[in-house]
Amino acid sequence: MAYFEEFESHLLNVSTNITKHTRHQRKNIARFQIMPQLRGSWSTFPFRIQPFNLANLHTKSFTKQAGLFGIDELKDPDGFYLLRENALQETEDLLSECISPDRSRKIVEVFDHLSDSLCRVADLSEFIRMAHPQAKYGYAAEDACIAIGGLVEKLNTNRPLYESLRDVVHQGDKFPTTEVDEHVGKLFLFDFEQSGIHLDASRRHQVVSLSESILTLGQHFMNGAMQPRAIAKEKLPNVISQHFAIDGDNVLVTGLFADAHNEMTREAAYKIFLYPDQHQEYLLTELVNNRHEMAKLCGFSSYASRAVSGSLAGSPDLIVNFLELLAAEVQPRAAEDFAEMKKMKKYMHQNKRALAPWDVPYYTGQARQNKFYVNTSDLSQYFSLGTVMDGLCGLLERLYNIKLQLEEPLPGELWISDVYKLAVIHKEEGLLGHIYCDFYERPGKAHQDCHFTIRGGKCLPDGSYQNPVVVLHLNLPSPSWSCPSLLTPGMVENLFHEMGHAMHSMLARTQYQHVTGTRCSTDFAEVPSILMEFFAQDPRVLHSFARHYKTGEKIPFDVLQRLVASKSVFGASELQLQSFYSLLDQRYHGETRWPSSTTTTNILEEVQNDFYGLPYVKDTAWQLRFGHLVGYGAKYYAYLVSRAVASWIWQKYFVNDPFSSEMGEKLRKEVLVHGGGKPPQMMVGEFLGKEVNAQNLVDALILDLDDKKSRIDTCTP
């Protein structure tokens, strides 16, 4: 399948032939010349140029003006008011139905209807608030978010609503239920009880107060974590201070400067930027203590226990056991990495000083460049967006029997004109959903690459299916008339990762939207996306599509082997670092508390010295810069568990043939189709034929690590 790639080549020739014209003339001529290629084959649009260059040609042929995402109410910003008012009214009706003794359907069906009604406004509004370039849309969407958020808070404290669900979950519904009904009902009940609604009024008030405090503390901590550190200029020699920003008589250190060639610069940045800040220490201590107190009030032994309930890992005990086993297994391998870095330090800089934490990122980067001779800018010429999308389309077609077909959006359907709308079509089951691809960077656009659910999939009362709608939000370089969008290998990997999330959303066929696609536990939600990274790091997959955007020449296979090997350099030390971070997070949020005289930095020092290969550096406190403690409190481990399961799946089903349709269909039918509709630990265990326990998870990671090490040894001269 080379639609995108062939069309890129055609457009590049068109562009070359008209370079003498003005920019305005060039666009008009190019549009005229490419129109014959587009008629009847919109699905083969190449991701070569931005859609707005073509959309204007078709606008006149439409008699209908659509709203955002095809929603009629959103033809202008005031439509958000209509959406939220409609949701509020529907909520009142569904609330009455939930608590009515004459309820005519399962309680879980009513709750999911209620959840869907609110999510369809909240999720859409949250995305538009963040992504729409026009402020009036952003403000209207933000107002809708606030209104729906306020309504959800009220529902979370609605005792009759809670009791109607609790009684059914504990005693059974008056209508026959399935295992899925019961599983989803328990998830709804758990969400309710996290807010403390099952407590008496006094304790419920405490929970609400603590929740508000936790939110505020987290916001202040995140803000403080990003602030630069100032130090008087005279305290640093000029050879160091010249590398930092100057503000009057002060030097501003804005980060760790991990790539700096001068070791003194790296060391100074590390020690200054990470110097303990008393206010940050106070905020983190209060945050952790308030979380623990709230969890205890709600009946949990710790905040970690509350955070991982119903997850793939299942319990803090399994998580800590997994992390400690992993630390023990990876320790000798990480020691080899550090020994190699120390040799590099001595050889490259005639330096006899001990290896330090500020050296690790620097020498990792140096090893990637010097050992494998990989030039990212040269490689990008083989990874135009059209070529990569061709590769993705071909891979997904072979794995899941689906195709991605470009659809022409209606006027008004998009928030920005350079967005692609893809229909996901299964060759037997038909349309599965839509993916809106907001691929290109632009001023004011949020920098993170991510996947947004706009509408979740679910079964409807008439027997039809509400197809999902998602957005892939990336920051790829925009194409020009002389050059397509060229991706670095890292961008290719990110695109595969986010497409993994999209496929989870598209391929799920859940009865309830509350558990559709990525609406599952954090440590399971990342499995499909990380699994796609394994495909993006496989030379066989990359070689199936990577071609030079000008000549069409395939990228040499040995170059891909070196590229893939370079990504795994010093993988053991990185795995050890991630396990150390995760253990620290569990320690902060576990059952064991510490005396008031003990600081979070004291705990950091202890955990680092026990589980990381390089000792703690006195008077530093990197945890006070670690924003993930806010967003992923007690859940930082999730990345490692997800990677372990993804590695396990890869090794068992795809390592011998990454294009296996049989294994892809097995993954779709036994895992992806369920979304979060089955308990993840049970589902993964059944799929892999083994219990999800600490040792099996560790074995999967170590096998992957050793496999990557063998690739490095093969490619190293």
Image: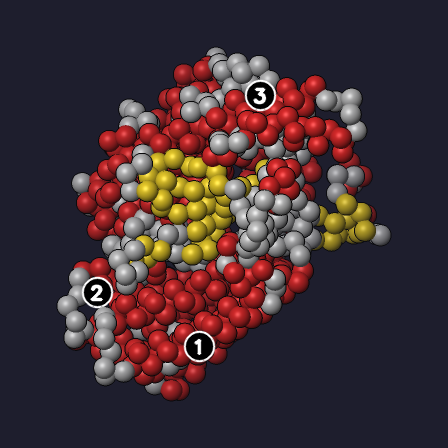
User: Real-space Cα distance between discs 2 and 3?
Assistant: 54 Å
User: Real-space Cα distance between discs 2 and 1?
Assistant: 28 Å
Q: Amino acid at mark 3?
A: Ser
Query: What is the secondary structure assignment of the residue under circle 3?
Result: helix
Name the residue located 15 percent from the left edge and 68 percent from the top edge.
Answer: 176
Q: Name the residue nearer the viewer: 194 or 62.
A: 62
Q: Residues within 10 Å of mark 3 (few under 14, many from 20)?
A: some
Q: Which residue is labeled 1 in the image?
A: 89
Name the residue located 25 percent from the left edge and 54 percent from the top edge.
Answer: 678
As drawn, the label of residue 9 is 3
Answer yes or no: is residue 592 visible.
no
Q: Which residue is labeled 2 in the image?
A: 182
**Where residue 370 sits: x, y (%)?**
57, 20
Task: Tell me if residue 490 comes above or below residue 313 in the rendering.
Answer: above
- Dot 2 or dot 1: first in sequence order is 1
For discs 2 and 1, the disc positioned in front in the rendered view: 1
The reply to whether dot 2 and dot 1 touch (C-beta < 8 Å) is no
Query: What is the secondary structure assignment of the residue under circle 2?
Result: helix
Q: Is residue 133 left or right of residue 243?
A: left
Q: Amino acid at mark 2?
A: Glu
**Where residue 314 sits: x, y (%)?**
28, 56
